[in-house]
Amino acid sequence: MNTMTQKYNSEINEVQSSKYDKDSLMEFKTLVQTIYNPIHDEKRISNTFGPLSVLQLNALIEIYNDNPLLRWKRFYTYLVSEKIISKKSEVQFVVPIYINAIQHYLTD
């Protein structure tokens, strides 16, 4: 096996092993509730993170890990495309709280 193939296989294995599952999603949502419910309205946090799926969590973590300089814009684009943000008034709350929540989850 040549070096290029080994590198490619290593990258694929790394991506496959970094996938988050249903248990990860539940851990993420529990962490979010623990951190944000006392600060923000419990209903608002539930509405913000409640509809999040495993696939969306994986995508957001991938976006988070990709490029810090483009992180906010890419989160915004993704959250709008997935209809997690439905009103312009939600942007300044939802994008930063998702970035912050994923940061807490990954460093916890």
Image (cartoon, rainbow, N blue to C red):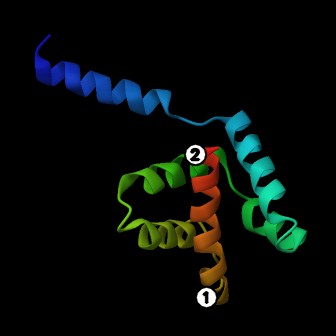
Compare residues 62 and 87 and report the one nearer the observer: 62
Q: Which mark is residue 18?
A: none
- What's the residue type where badge 1 is placed? Lys
| Residue 60 locus on image (x, y percent) | 53, 55
Question: Badge 2, how many Cα within 10 Å: few under 14, some, many 20+?
Answer: few
Q: Which residue is mark 1?
A: 88
| Residue 93 locus on image (x, y percent) | 66, 79
Q: Mark 1 and 2 residues: CB-CB less than 8 Å, in contact?
A: no
| Residue 28 locus on image (x, y percent) | 71, 47
* Residue at 57% from the left image edge and 55% from the top image edge: 103
Q: Residue furthest bottom?
A: 89
Q: Is residue 107 left or right of 14 when viewed as pictured?
A: right
* On screen, residue 6 above or below 36: above
Question: Badge 1, how many Cα within 10 Å: few under 14, some, many 20+?
Answer: few
- Marks 1 and 2 sit apart, C-alpha to C-alpha, by 28 Å
Q: Is residue 54 left or right of 11 when viewed as pictured?
A: right
| Residue 5 locus on image (x, y percent) | 17, 21
Kindly indicate the quadrant of the structure image that contains residue 38: bottom right
Q: Which residue is mark 2?
A: 106
Label 1: element kind = helix
* Residue at 73% from the left image edge and 61% from the top image edge: 49
Q: Residue furthest front?
A: 108
- What's the residue type where badge 2 is placed? Leu
Compare residues 22 and 68 and report the one nearer the observer: 68
Label 2: element kind = helix
Foreground label between 1 and 2: 2
The N terminus is located in which quarter?
top left
| Total marks placed | 2
Kindly indicate the quadrant of the structure image that contains residue 73: bottom left
